[in-house]
Amino acid sequence: MLSWLVDSPNHPGWPATLGPLRVPAGVVTVRPIKMRDAKQWSALRIKNQNTLLPWEPTGVGPWDARHQPGSWAPLFSVLKAEAKRGTVLPFVIELDGRYVGQLTVGNVQRGAVRSAWIGYWIDAGHTGQGITTAAVALGMDHCFGPVGLHRLEATVQPENGASQAILRKLGFREEGLLRRYMDVNARWRDHLLFAITTEEIVGSAVETLVRSGKAVG
């Protein structure tokens, strides 16, 4: 189910290709970001401004300017450097080989904590089809498997019911409310904290989806 290529034994988890996993919409694969993703990243981010802006951290400058193809190279360089250090795992979500979104694991901590957060976004035209859920499941199994983590967290605004549904479907539990947690769309927003530990998963996250009939292994 999972295949990975690890460039350093000290920083497992990236680059890696996760999947494939079949859902009714098609075949979902999660693969490392690439420099050549610039045009697809820009097109999807600009196209989805209205659906992404309410949920994402406040950026500097207009959305269009921040998401031109030329903005990808410096972002890619930062993410790749962090990935090589093992602190961030940046991935692209593909459906039948087409770029439809991104999955990121961040603030990866080792030692006694062994935790990270997981975040994701997808093209509005592909929501509600089980694609993001499948990608998150693949990411969870990767984190709890070769990456060696014990706990994953996700923060979601109370109004973002779709994102909460994805997490609950995969076994994340709500741990509390973080008041004025993050500057989103020029305002400090409350977020719900969700978390899951490896002991709470029966088999794997992917197996959970397969058992429920929402994916085919």
Image (spheres, rainbow, N blue to C red):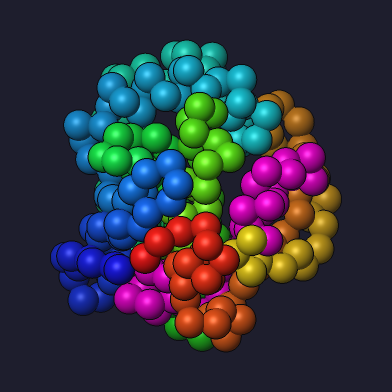
On the rendered structure, is 133 left or right of 3?
Answer: right
Report x, y in % for residue 21: 36, 57
On the rendered structure, is 43 left or right of 14?
Answer: right
Quarter of the picture containing the N terminus is bottom left
Specify start and end residues of the magenta stretch as a single range.
Answer: 141-168
Q: Is residue 173 visible to the viewer in this orientation of the structure?
A: yes
Who's the residue at 37% across and 44% down the image? 26
Report x, y in % for residue 102: 42, 42
Looking at this view, is 192 or 184 the one in front? 192
Q: Is residue 99 above or below residue 172?
A: above
Looking at this view, is 212 or 148 the one in front? 212
Report x, y in % for residue 42: 37, 22
**Which image quadrant for residue 108?**
bottom left
Q: Is residue 184 above or below residue 9?
A: above
On the rendered structure, is 6 left or right of 129?
Answer: left
Who's the residue at 39% across and 35% down the image? 100
Q: Is residue 79 visible to the viewer in this orientation of the structure?
A: no
Q: Is residue 26 above or below residue 42?
A: below
On the rendered structure, is 79 left or right of 184?
Answer: left
Report x, y in % for residue 147: 36, 73
In magenta segment, residue 111: no
